[in-house]
Every structure is written in C-alpha cells, then in structure tokens.
C-alpha cells in the first residue's frame, strides 16, 4: 500500500486508489506517521478530532473498524488492537 500524504491519496498493492472518508484518512495518517507505536483512543481522538473523548465514546473504534475493512482487503492485518492500550500499525513503513 502507498500513502501519498501530499496528494491525500491511498493506493493498494495493485495501484488502485482506496477511497477513504476524511476521518479515515486522518486516522491512517496518525498510524503511518507513528509506525510501531501503540496509539491510545484518546491520542487518536485528539489528533483526528481535536478533542478528548469520554470513557464511553467508541467513535475511534468504529473508525478503525471501517478503515481496516478498506485497507486490509488482502486479509493481512495492518492495524492491530493492543488490549487496554489502543491500536498499533503492525507493518513497517518506508518513506519514499
């Protein structure tokens, strides 16, 4: 997968564009710019929405689920859940 931050474009392995909502794209940017780090729900909410979430707010969980469905078409898990901590991008990132 290729994420072009300047063009705000995401391409799959075959070069086909993956259409993401603005919220999904911003969430993906959080992961690719911080590879290998566990990102908490609070951090993701703050970076994508500019606000803190309350304990019952599951917005990030829903967005991660939708993002996974769109980018994990090959069945390879790219975003993993870290129980009681958040999410992590589970693949290496290369800057080109």
Image (cartoon, rainbow, N blue to C red):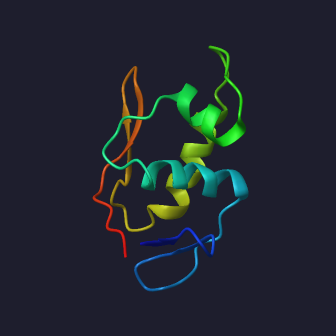
Residue 22 at x, y percent in the picture: 71, 57
**How many tags in the picture?**
0
Image position of 77 with respect to 14: above or below: above
Q: Residue at x 58, y 49 (%)?
A: 27
Q: Residue at x 31, y 67 (%)?
A: 94
Name the residue furthest top: 55
Image position of 53 with respect to 3: above or below: above
49 lies left or right of 73: right
Image position of 20 with respect to 63: above or below: below
Residue 62 at x, y percent in the picture: 62, 39
73 or 56, which lies in front?
Answer: 56
Q: Residue at x 67, y 22 (%)?
A: 53
79 or 4, which lies in front?
Answer: 4
Q: Residue at x 65, y 16 (%)?
A: 56
67 or 47, which lies in front?
Answer: 47
83 lies left or right of 17: left
Image position of 54 with respect to 81: above or below: above
Q: Quadrant of the N terminus?
A: bottom left
Residue 47 at x, y percent in the picture: 61, 39
Residue 91 at x, y percent in the picture: 30, 56
32 lies left or right of 36: right
Q: Quadrant of residue 96?
A: bottom left
């Amino acid at each position: 997968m290729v994420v072009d931050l300047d063009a705000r474009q995401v391409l799959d392995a075959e070069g086909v564009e993956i259409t993401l909502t603005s919220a999904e794209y911003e969430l993906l940017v959080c992961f690719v710019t911080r590879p290998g780090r566990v990102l908490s729900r609070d951090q993701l909410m703050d970076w994508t929405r500019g606000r803190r979430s309350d304990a019952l707010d599951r917005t990030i969980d829903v967005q991660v689920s939708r993002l996974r469905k769109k980018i994990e078409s090959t069945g390879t898990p790219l975003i993993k859940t870290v129980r009681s901590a958040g999410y992590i991008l589970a693949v290496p990132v290369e800057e080109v």
